[in-house]
Image (cartoon, rainbow, N blue to C red):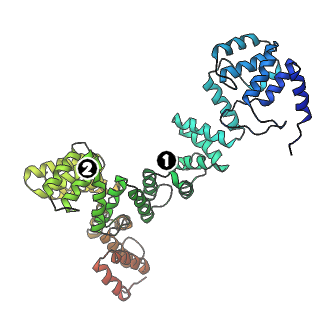
Amino acid sequence: METAEDPMVTRMRKEAEKGDAAAAFRFGLAYFSFSTEKEAEVNHLGIKADPKEAFKWFKVSADKGNANGQFALAICYGEGLGVAKDANKAKELFALSDGKTNFEIDVFDYNPKETPEQRRKKRLANAAAAGDMESQRKYALDFLEQKNKYKAAFWFDLAAKAGDKESQYQLALMFLDSPNWSSSNGCELNRSTAVKWLSESSEKIDAKTLYRIGELFDTGKGGTKDNAEAVKWFQQAADKGLPDAQYELANRYRSGSGGCPKDEKKSGELYQKCAADADKDVLLAQLCKGLCLQNGYGSEKNPEEAAVWFRKVAEQGDARGRYELGAYLEQAGGMKNHQEAFALYQKAAEQKYAPAMLNLGNCYQRGIGVAPDNNERHKWYAKAAEQGDAEAQYRIAVNHYDNKGNLGEAFKLFAKAAEQGHVQAQVNLGFCYLLAKGTKQDKAAAAKCFQKAAEQGDESAKELLKEIDNFNITP
């Protein structure tokens, strides 16, 4: 059963059909909408937007000399609504109507001097300010394209709070780039919410985004550091073929750190996957090719060939390649090799690559390619520790502990290294708790540290767990 037409529409239609110019204009207005992207909702008269119908009735009005009709018809020609765009026709009609339109034309909020893009943005801004969720998202995307992240975040946030899934996803992506900035910009967004929104759009999450989520947990941005959660996301990125993730996990399994148990086989498999595109001049793949040859992953060991690949990467200015080539030359021995190794470590250290900083400190300690210098050694160990290198943190802590230095600092550094899975740091942290060195005595906390080290295969930690009950802990 068809719905009866609104009596007002019936009257307007009849008057328009009789050729009444004012009625034809009003009837065209009932069908008019600037939106050509989708069919508008039914208006209060029960009419859906129809640009062709609007054009038809505006033309009836314009042909009879009605200025409002001429102005409206000019918009149709200018915007391509219900008719092909015709800039000359639009200009002619605007000229005819200039200064003759009455207050009814204000509903268009249309300035012929504005460019189409200016008019689009103005309408979008008005709709967004009025609370239209889709317009808020589109307005935010405009600002994002202009690299104005503050305004983009503001409009995404409004749409996201209203439940717009795309805005939630976009805002979560922005959070990955600047988690601390996002939380201080009026956007009520935290890490768990951002990850939830991203997960709800799982079909959009590519390998790079998965890796970036892992980095949030790995660095502790937007919340606490969580190695296990970081590894989970890195693994998903590695499974999708991202070389960065494969390399990162391979390193962790190789050293037994960063939430990964020591597993030479798994490490080798990941290096081999990463090395797949070495012949296509993919830098990280070339680096992994060298590591495979150096360690015999998937082939016989060939250190000399490995060094060729490391040099290819180093010559491209990559800190990791410089570090690996330096390590090879250091092992190769000889003054000339040691001097080049030192120079490579120095360049990589200046690029803030923590393992190179650590090895540079070793060079100053042992006189490899440079005269021994304790001050320089401590300086580079400290820089590596600041970059989060677990081995450097452990060594500085040992220095404090063994030489009756700052036991509180030793405890803190052991804790940082232990959190990254450094086995010996976990054992030493256990002793700090057990013997009240730099912290309060805590037998239960000591047992947890020894347990973590034991789970990574440390025999001394296993023995300590057996004997811990025999330790006499005094208040």
Determine the CA span between mark 2 and mark 1.
33 Å
Residue 92 appears left or right of 45 = left
Question: Which quarter of the picture shows residue 20?
Answer: top right
Looking at this view, is 433 or 46 the one in front? Answer: 46
Q: Residue at x 43, y 80 (%)?
A: 444
Label 2 or label 1, whichever lies nearer to me, is 2
Mark 2 lies on residue: 278
Residue 94 against residue 236 in the figure, above or below: above
Percent of width and height locating residue 441: 41, 78
Q: Amino acid at mark 1?
A: Ser
Mark 1 lies on residue: 178
Q: Residue at x 78, y 21 (%)?
A: 58
Q: Residues within 10 Å of mark 2 (few under 14, many from 20)?
A: some
The answer to the question of whether label 2 and label 1 lie on touching residues, with beta carbons closer than 8 A, is: no
Q: Which mark is residue 453?
A: none
Q: Amino acid at mark 2?
A: Ala
Mark 2 and mark 1 lie on one chain; the one further toward the N terminus is 1
Percent of width and height locating residue 396: 29, 62
Secondary element under disc 1, as helix, strand or loop, is: loop
Looking at this view, is 473 or 274 the one in front? Answer: 274
Looking at this view, is 121 or 348 the one in front? Answer: 121
